[in-house]
Image (cartoon, rainbow, N blue to C red):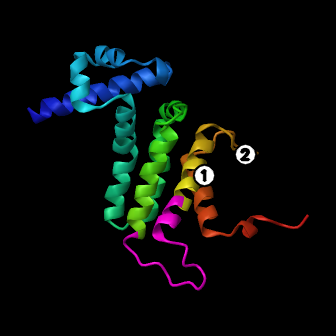
Amino acid sequence: MEIKREITKELLTESFHTLLLTHDFDKITIKMITDEAGVIRPTFYYYFEDKYDLLSFILYKNVFSRVKELNALDMDVEGVKSIFISIEKDKKFYQRAFEVTGQNSFEHMFYNYSYELFLERLNHYALRDIPNYHLLTKDVVAKYYSIGFVNIIKEWLQNTFQCSYNENPTAEEIFGAYEFLNSHSILDLLKKE
């Protein structure tokens, strides 16, 4: 019985995934999802509250669950890198997902999972006792890094990076830029003209 439930949940997930590639999120109905999956409408509500819940499930399952596995092995850098790689594998879907705006925006979902990820990692360590920086709590630090992380992913997916040699930077290139920004001061980017 459990296998049948997993198969049904996967059918709904695949159905929604396929529909989002060709339809605006707002135009996708629960009936469209269930018809595509070959199940009846009430079945959807057994697994998901609404299509926002389904979108959040896909994000967690396909991107963030892998990170948790790597972080459990103290492979933090590899975990973050895996997010870029997972997104690159299904770039068109995530580009479409970032078009979901409003109160339940995809950007907000991504931010929440990122925040949980950064806060979880911070909770494995004690913050250094830096004079005059008592305001930098784990919560504030997790929020700060989450905002930057979501922004670089979103900019990448919206193709707003201007590269002289490559119009579509790879996950490796974007991760390298992200890693540089996190390990250097903004002053390290500047040079006198």
Q: Is residue 156 above or below residue 45?
A: below
Label 2 residue SS: loop
Q: Quadrant of residue 125?
A: bottom left
* Prevailing secondary structure class for the magenta stretch in the rendered image: loop
Name the residue type under label 1.
Glu
Is there a contact, CB below 8 Å, between mark 1 and mark 2? yes
Residue 173 image label: 1
Q: What residue is rendered at 61% in x and 82% in y?
A: 132
Was residue 17 drawn as part of the magenta stretch in this picture? no
Task: Answer whether residue 79 is visible to the viewer in this image.
Answer: no
Q: Which residues are magenta?
A: 123-143
170 in relation to 68, above or below? above
Other-residue count near label 1 (Cα within 10 Å), few / some / many at <14 / 14–19 / ≥20: few
Element under label 1? helix
Residue 57 is left or right of residue 155, and the answer is left
Q: Circle 2 is placed at which residue position?
A: 163
**Left or right of residue 93, residue 160 in this image:** right
Sequence-wise, which precedes: disc 1 or disc 2? 2
Task: Say whether residue 124 is magenta.
Answer: yes
Q: CA distance from mark 1 to mark 2?
A: 11 Å
Query: Please, what is the three-letter code of the amino acid marked with disc 2?
Result: Cys
- The residue positioned 52% from the left and 56% from the top of the image is 146
Quadrant of the image containing the C terminus: bottom right
Relative placement, left or right, of 98 versus 181 is left
